Image: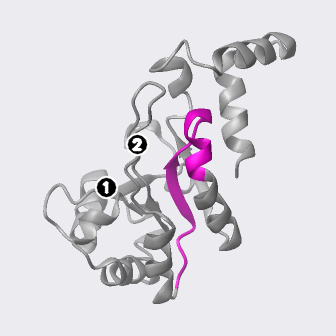
Amino acid sequence: MKESGLARKEYWLTTKWSGLDNKNARQSCEESLEKLGVEYIDLYLIHHPNVTKGDIPGAWKQMEELHKEGKVKSIGVSKSVHSRHLGFMLTCSFSVDNLELLLSGANVKPVVNQILLHPYVIKSTEPLLKYMKHHHIVPEGYSSLIPLTSEPGGPVDKPVNKIAKRLGVKPEQVLLAWSKAKE
């Protein structure tokens, strides 16, 4: 980032409190700031509720403090979902229940919930998307290209390719536009 010559305000920086290092949200954030050599993070996420060790409201208070201090400009959460080819095994992380618990004591709402978002999981994701829309929490899709990259040969291939051909774009662009339309 330093070598790019860009001023800090010219790029967007997102990172997560992963919990992998047994540090709390504050410790992890401060370590990220130091390692990245920046004064603030634009978006800081709780990777999944398990890192809160059962205290989602307490962990969110730490996130709010980091926000209040200006170390992070925006705060949010992330939802981890794992899938298998056309037989999806869902591990619901920041689900509606988790968000309700978080919001029950929050002074600052999460601005985003980063979720797995592609056609093969939309049915199971719709209730969460509806809840997030009601509470003005933006969905940030990840792995939207799974139907093309990891699970080709599924039922979306034919319609996605047909749309891509009709519009003169790549199939990846069709899926990314689909994901964006879910916001």
Query: Residue drawn 52% across and 15% down?
Result: 152
Q: Is residue 134 left or right of residue 117?
A: right
Query: Residue drawn 70% across and 13% down?
Result: 158
For label 1, the residue is: 37
> Which label belongs to residue 141?
none
Farthest right residue in view:
166
Asked whether the beta carbons under mark 1 and mark 2 sit within 8 Å of each other, the answer is: yes
Which of the 4 quarters of the picture holds residue 131? bottom right
In the rendered structure, does residue 109 fall within the stretch colored magenta?
Answer: yes
Write the start and end of the magenta stretch as one range: 108-125
Query: Residue drawn 69% across and 24% down?
Result: 173
Q: Amino acid at mark 2?
A: Met
Q: How is the image coloured?
A: one colour
Report crowding for label 2: few under 14, some 14 to 19, many 20 or more residues within 10 A (C-alpha): few
Mark 1 lies on a secondary structure that is loop
> Which label belongs to residue 1?
2
* Quadrant of the image containing the N terminus: top left
Q: Position of residue 183 (x, y in %)?
A: 70, 52
Q: CA distance from mark 1 to mark 2?
A: 9 Å
Front position in the image: 148 or 27: 148
Front position in the image: 42 or 128: 128
